[in-house]
């Protein structure tokens, strides 16, 4: 009888120890899961970029930060032709402003950020707009007649048109260059050179004219 009681007591102790061990194991697993969940909650996907000012021809690398290394980053821009952009670098092509939207994606998480790139010219720029009896290519104005007409638009360092600039102009080799309202009339008998100067910004440029 005593032996049976001892056996029962030992079995009870063993059972209690097994239950205790299972409880400890479950507690450890629970704590590990809580820790893992807390770590996952702390790693929130974030992508960030600051506004950038660049000069034409400049290259900028590592222009954004994302806190998850293997995140896929998509790039959208609202103005084509101003910059050449990929995930590694930005190249400024011509003056102007571009809004860039970055979208980072990983494991079902999405993060977005938008920033602006302002590309500035090193110097003022101009554009000759051919209108009557002429073609313009590679800084040479080709005249198809003794009388031609064209226009000139002047741009500031941000690529914006300068409204109503005061442009002084002249021509050599007997040619006559006259400004009429918003366009120029050139009368020529031979090849010549046109000179333009904008005193308010101290900017000058020259255009060669070839009579065809």
Image: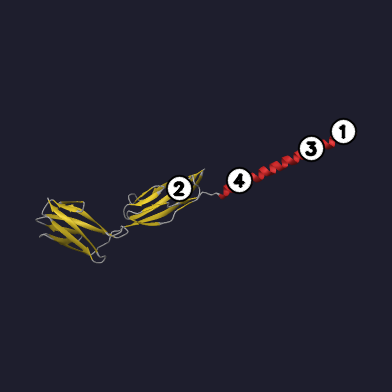
The residue at the point 57 percent across, 48 percent down is 41
Rounded to the nearest angstrom, the CA distance separating label 4 from label 3 is 33 Å
Q: Secondary structure at mark 1?
A: helix
Which mark is first along the chain, 3 or 4?
Answer: 3
Rounded to the nearest angstrom, the CA distance separating label 4 from label 1 is 48 Å
Q: Residue furthest bottom?
A: 200
Q: Secondary structure at mark 3?
A: helix
Give the labeled residue for mark 2. Answer: 103
Crowd class of label 4 (few under 14; some 14 to 19; many from 20; radius 10 Å): few
Give the labeled residue for mark 3. Answer: 14
Would residue 122 appear left or right of 101 to someone viewing this image?
left
Question: Which of the numbered marks, if any, corresponds to residue 4?
Answer: 1
Which mark is first along the chain, 2 or 3?
Answer: 3
Which mark is first along the chain, 2 or 4?
Answer: 4
Q: Position of residue 22 (x, y in %)?
A: 72, 40
Is residue 101 shown above or below 194?
above
Question: Which of the numbered marks, if any, corresponds to residue 36?
Answer: 4
Rounded to the nearest angstrom, the CA distance separating label 2 from label 1 is 73 Å
């Amino acid at each position: 009888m005593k032996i049976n009681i001892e056996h029962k007591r030992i079995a009870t102790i063993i059972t209690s120890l097994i239950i205790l061990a299972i409880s400890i194991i479950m507690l450890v697993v629970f704590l590990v899961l809580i820790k893992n969940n807390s770590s996952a909650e702390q790693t929130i996907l974030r992508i960030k970029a600051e506004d950038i000012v660049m000069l034409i021809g400049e290259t900028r690398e590592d222009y954004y930060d994302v806190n998850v290394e293997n995140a896929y980053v998509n790039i959208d821009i609202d103005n084509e032709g101003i910059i050449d952009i990929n995930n590694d670098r930005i190249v400024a092509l011509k003056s102007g402003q571009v809004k860039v939207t970055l979208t980072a994606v990983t494991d079902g998480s999405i993060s977005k950020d938008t920033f602006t790139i302002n590309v500035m010219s090193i110097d003022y720029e101009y554009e000759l707009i051919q209108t009557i009896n002429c073609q313009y290519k590679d800084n040479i104005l080709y005249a198809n007649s003794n009388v031609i007409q064209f226009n000139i638009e002047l741009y500031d360092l941000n690529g914006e048109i300068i409204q109503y600039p005061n442009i002084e102009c002249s021509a050599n080799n007997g040619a006559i260059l006259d400004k009429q309202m918003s366009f120029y009339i050139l009368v020529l008998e031979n090849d010549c050179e046109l000179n333009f100067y904008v005193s308010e910004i101290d900017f000058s440029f020259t255009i060669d004219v070839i009579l065809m």
